[in-house]
Amino acid sequence: MGKRAYITDLDGTLLRSDQTLSGYTIGVLSNALAQDVVVSFATARGYISAHSVVSAIPWKYPLILYNGALLYDGLQHTVIGGYWLENTLTDRIFEIGRASHSAIM
């Protein structure tokens, strides 16, 4: 049988209501990672925001960020892959936003 991977959410799952990790959680996950259990997290957050609340755990497997739009290597600080909007669509979104902003001002 192949290796199993365990993926957790952060907000409302791994983190307590005050956006912190319990000592128990840090211990269990750190121990699992030390035993080479594949454990990671998926979150709507970006890397900096996620890292600020879970940096006590020595994550060593890819992280799933921005609601699954980005796969990130936290050890090498590199993007592994992701899904991005086409440039023409992004440009059009900015045009609409600028036009809406001008109409309000």
Image: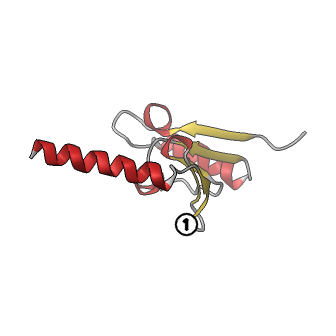
Left or right side of 47 for 30: right
Instruction: Tell me if 87 is positioned left or right of 32 in this view.
Output: left
Instruction: Give whichever of 71, 92 is nearer the camera.
Output: 92
Outermost residue to the bottom:
76
Name the image quarter holding residue 75: bottom right
Residue at the right extreme?
1
Q: Amino acid at mark 1?
A: His
> Can you see residue 46?
no
- The image shows residue 98 at horizontal and vertical percentages of 24, 50
The percent position of residue 47, horizontal first and vertical second, equals 47, 55
User: Residue at point 39% right, 54% down?
Assistant: 91
In the rendered view, how is the structure colored?
Answer: secondary structure
Name the residue furthest left. Answer: 105
Q: Position of residue 90 (x, y in %)?
A: 42, 51
Q: Is residue 76 above or below residue 49?
A: below
Residue behind mark 1:
77
Q: Is residue 62 visible?
A: yes
Percent position of residue 20, x then y:
39, 43
Residue at the spot 48% in from the left edge and 39% down from the top edge: 10
How many marks overall? 1
Query: Taking 52 as reference, is 27 left or right?
Result: right
Dot 1 lies on which element?
A: loop
Nearest the viewer among 26 and 74 is 74
- Indicate the quadrant containing the N terminus: top left, top right, bottom left or bottom right: top right
Q: Residue at x 53, y 51 (%)?
A: 84
State the residue at coordinates (55%, 46%): 69
Left or right of 101? Residue 36 is right
Q: Residues within 10 Å of mark 1 (few under 14, many from 20)?
A: few
Look at the picture and state if 70 lies above or below 67.
below
